[in-house]
Amino acid sequence: MKTINRLILFLTLFLLLALPAGAARTVAKGAADSASDQQLTLKYNDFMQFARNKVKDLNRNHKFSRSRMQISKQPDGTYRALYHQIENSELVGTVRRSSSKSVPFVGILSYQEQVFESYGKTPEACKQGDFSLISIIPNKHIFSYKKGLWN
């Protein structure tokens, strides 16, 4: 009997740790939660659409976006162009239920802001040059779902 209890405990812990959070919750609560899981999936899809639009705005409005890249003259007389960009394909989002009645869901958006640079003999030459990735800045934003909208 002791061996069976240990086996059951091991399998339960294994399933809870090995499966994604949503799947582990489904295993723990059973089939009665399927409508709730569908609602969470819908909110996740809404959140990822919101996140893609948010990143589009961030790219457009960034101080050093590609259209407003920073160009600086170097000590050797060449020019350096620098810009920041966020790739939509690099977005990672999670949505969780909240214990708050006014904010039923919380979304976390993680992405990597990439910094590119190019050098040239003139400002125009560095703008047209081959850009190299020089830095990656990890970012994480928390959003709340309130009154039918992600904020």
Image: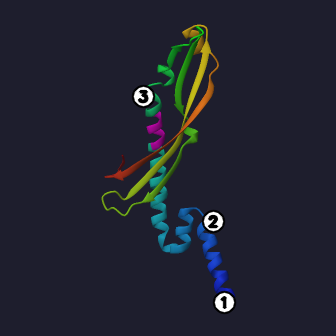
Q: Quadrant of residue 132?
A: top right
Q: Which residues are magenta?
A: 51-56
Q: Residues within 10 Å of mark 1 (few under 14, many from 20)?
A: few
- Image quarter in which the N terminus is found: bottom right
Image point 57% across, 41% down: which residue?
90
The local secondary structure at tag 1 comes to helix
Q: Provide the residue designation for mark 2.
A: 18
Q: Is residue 54 magenta?
A: yes
Task: Give coordinates of residue 20: x percent, y percent.
Answer: 58, 62
Image point 36% across, 59% down: which residue?
104
Residue 25 is marked as none
Q: Earlier in the sequence, mark 1 or mark 2?
A: 1
Task: Give coordinates of residue 46: x percent, y percent.
Answer: 45, 49
Q: Please tell me whether residue 136 is drawn above or below residue 48 in the rendered image.
A: above
Q: CA distance from mark 1 to mark 2?
A: 24 Å
Q: CA distance from mark 1 to mark 3?
A: 62 Å
Q: Please tell me whether residue 30 is drawn above or below residue 140 in the rendered image.
A: below
Extreme right residue here?
A: 3
* Residue 139 left/right relative to 12: left
Please, what is the three-letter code of the amino acid marked with disc 1? Lys
Of residues 129 and 74, the one nearer the viewer is: 74
Task: Give coordinates of residue 42: x percent, y percent.
Answer: 46, 55
Residue 2 is marked as 1
Q: Provide the residue designation for mark 3.
A: 61
Please, what is the three-letter code of the amino acid marked with disc 3? Asn
Image point 48% across, 25% down: which residue?
65
Please, what is the three-letter code of the amino acid marked with disc 2? Ala
